[in-house]
């Protein structure tokens, strides 16, 4: 029992020295470096969000132009790449090797020139099922 108490007293006396020793080994700018890593990560997240928004804009424009039929998800997957490539081929241009905001804005501007698609069945309601009912007596 006395041995256990002695060990606990020794640990209690040595623990503050150990903490001071560990603090002395941590560089002064450690927390500053940690903050810049966190800040960089936040900037990367903002860039990723902006990229997703731009790709969604591109997908919407390609949909309006009739080249994209997938989900508007902000992911530049194979169907988005194929739609972009098909669009550029249709206007006689080479597909850009890397997508830029200028490309997104160009496709959007071209999509704005296209009239909105008409609802199924035409604008006068032709081809739309007409329902009538008779009131029971």
Image: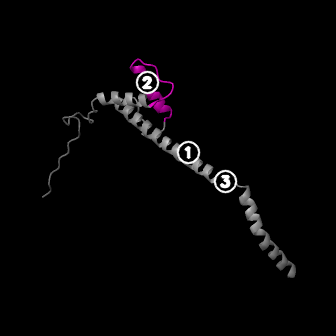
Q: Which quadrant is home to the C terminus?
A: bottom left
Residue pointed to by mark 1? 40
Residue pointed to by mark 3? 28
Disc 1 and disc 2: Cα gap in Å? Answer: 37 Å
Residue 86 numbered tag: 2
Callout 1: SS: helix
Give the mark toward the camera: 3 or 1.
Answer: 3
**Mark 1, other Cα within 10 Å: few <14 / some 14–19 / many ≥20:** few
Was residue 90 drawn as part of the magenta stretch in this picture? yes
Q: Earlier in the sequence, mark 3 or mark 1?
A: 3
Q: Is residue 50 visible?
A: yes
Q: Position of residue 6 (x, y in %)?
A: 84, 77
Q: In the figure, residue 136 lies in which quadrant? A: bottom left
User: Which residue occupies the extreme right position in the image?
Assistant: 3
Above or below, 76 against 20 in this view is: above
Was residue 11 drawn as part of the magenta stretch in this picture? no
Using the image as rendered, state which of residue 52 and residue 65 is in the foreground: 52
Q: Position of residue 85 (x, y in %)?
A: 46, 25
Residue pictured at 39% horizontal, 36% vertical: 57
Residue 32 numbered tag: none
Residue pictured at 77% horizontal, 64% vertical: 18
Callout 3: SS: loop
Using the image as rendered, state which of residue 11 and residue 136 is in the foreground: 11
Residue pictured at 27% horizontal, 30% vertical: 115
Q: Which residues are magenta?
A: 76-100
Left or right: 33, with 93 as reference point: right
């Amino acid at each position: 029992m006395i041995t256990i108490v002695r060990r606990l007293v020794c640990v209690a006396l040595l623990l503050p020295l150990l903490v001071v020793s560990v603090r002395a080994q941590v560089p002064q700018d450690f927390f500053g470096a940690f903050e810049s890593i966190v800040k960089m990560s936040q900037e990367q997240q903002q860039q990723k969000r902006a990229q997703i928004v731009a790709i969604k804009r591109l997908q919407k424009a390609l949909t309006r132009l009739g080249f994209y039929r997938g989900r508007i998800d902000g992911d530049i997957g194979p169907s988005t790449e194929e739609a972009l490539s098909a669009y550029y081929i249709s206007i006689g241009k080479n597909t850009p090797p890397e997508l830029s905001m200028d490309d997104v804005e160009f496709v959007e501007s071209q999509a704005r020139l296209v009239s909105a698609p008409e609802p199924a069945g035409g604008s006068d309601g032709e081809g739309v099922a007409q329902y009538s009912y008779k009131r029971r007596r």
